[in-house]
């Protein structure tokens, strides 16, 4: 079958070559699913992780997708063009990790960051070019418990891609065929803020108090509601109207034992994405003169350790 560039509007190739920069909870899950669906997957990571992945593949435990092992290639840097590069590292490691994917090696492939926050697309476009970068968001709870070992806890895995349905059709179809619910959305700013106004309260509260989302939504619901209202106000000031009540209701659909990725990082002693999540919220609030007393207090307390 003839293959074509994913940057065109022609049909997608039958078998994609996908690089995954950062095969952790999110990247490892997607790497495993895409490999299982028949695509060639190259994981780009540190030497120890790359060695483990070459030997053992990606091992996934998932209520949604079942338990499976999928083979992947792995290297410490991207050394050939690919159709798609998924960027799924933590913000705290983003700058250093991008050195593993030189722009001149990437070729005409798309760059799809599935990161927390709203400020990263600009930096990626500066490095790789505006046309290559497709902003996206993912809704999932997935954790790397060891190199190559992924524990997927949420009953859903959903991706929003920003752009036209016509342009993103092949990419959407690839993810859908792998079992990931995927939809194109027109407004990039709206998509990024829709995630942040949900994620910021979830991450800041679960991490600050060491509680699951079930414990937060019952024992600290007033604080949760106040923080959601602040995030929604900032989103509205940025041109993205948000329904605070609807956002608050979404927390009730999460498994009670769910933890945010920031909380898991705190428990493991890893650097926190405070700047990308809470910092981005506060910077936008300051630009637009929106008061955020709850978010400001939580950020101060978290930064104080």
Image (cartoon, rainbow, N blue to C red):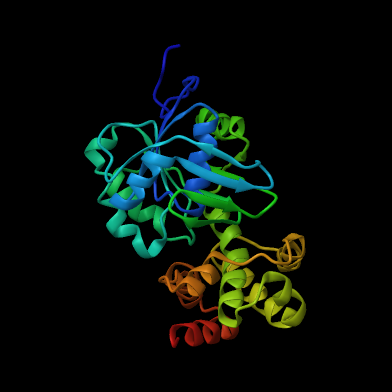
Quadrant placement of the N terminus = top left
Residue 206 rendering spot, x and y as whole percentages: 61, 75
Residue 124, visible in the rendered structure: yes
Number of numbered discs? 0
Nearest the eye: 211 or 148: 148
User: In the rendered view, would you say 293 is above or below 23?
Assistant: below
What's the residue at 73%, 68% (across, down)? 248
Nearest the eye: 181 or 245: 181
Can you tell which quarter of the image residue 164 is in? top right
Quadrant placement of the C terminus = bottom left
Residue 252 rendering spot, x and y as whole percentages: 77, 65
Residue 54 rendering spot, x and y as whole percentages: 37, 39
Residue 284, visible in the rendered structure: no
Nearest the eye: 233 or 132: 132
What's the residue at 39%, 43% (across, down)? 53
User: In the rendered view, would you say 277 is above or below 192?
Assistant: below
């Amino acid at each position: 079958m003839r293959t074509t560039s994913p940057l065109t509007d022609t049909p997608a190739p039958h078998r994609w070559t996908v690089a995954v920069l950062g095969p952790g909870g999110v990247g490892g899950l997607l790497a495993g699913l895409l490999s299982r669906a028949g695509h060639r997957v190259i994981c780009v990571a540190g030497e120890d992780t790359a060695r483990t992945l070459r030997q053992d593949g990606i091992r996934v435990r998932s209520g949604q997708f079942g338990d499976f092992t999928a083979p992947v290639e792995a290297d410490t840097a991207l050394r050939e063009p690919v159709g798609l590069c998924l960027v799924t590292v933590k913000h705290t490691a983003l700058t250093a990790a991008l050195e593993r994917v030189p722009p001149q090696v990437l070729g005409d492939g798309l760059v799809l960051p599935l990161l927390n926050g709203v400020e990263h697309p600009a930096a990626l476009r500066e490095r790789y070019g505006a046309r290559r970068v497709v902003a996206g968001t993912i809704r999932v709870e997935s954790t790397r418990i060891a190199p190559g070992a992924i524990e997927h806890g949420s009953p859903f895995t959903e991706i929003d891609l920003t752009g036209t349905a016509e342009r993103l059709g092949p990419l959407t179809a690839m993810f859908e065929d792998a079992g990931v619910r995927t939809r194109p959305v027109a407004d990039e700013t709206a998509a990024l803020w829709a995630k942040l106004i949900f994620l910021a309260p979830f991450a800041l509260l679960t991490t600050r108090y060491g509680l699951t989302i079930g414990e937060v939504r019952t024992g600290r619901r007033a604080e949760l509601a106040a923080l959601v209202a602040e995030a929604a106000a900032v989103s509205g000031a940025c041109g993205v109207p948000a329904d605070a009540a609807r956002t608050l209701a979404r927390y009730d659909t999460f498994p009670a034992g769910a933890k945010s990725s920031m909380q898991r990082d705190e428990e493991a002693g890893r650097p926190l994405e405070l700047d990308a999540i809470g910092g981005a919220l506060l910077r936008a609030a300051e630009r637009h003169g929106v008061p955020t007393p709850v978010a400001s207090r939580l950020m101060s307390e978290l930064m104080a350790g």
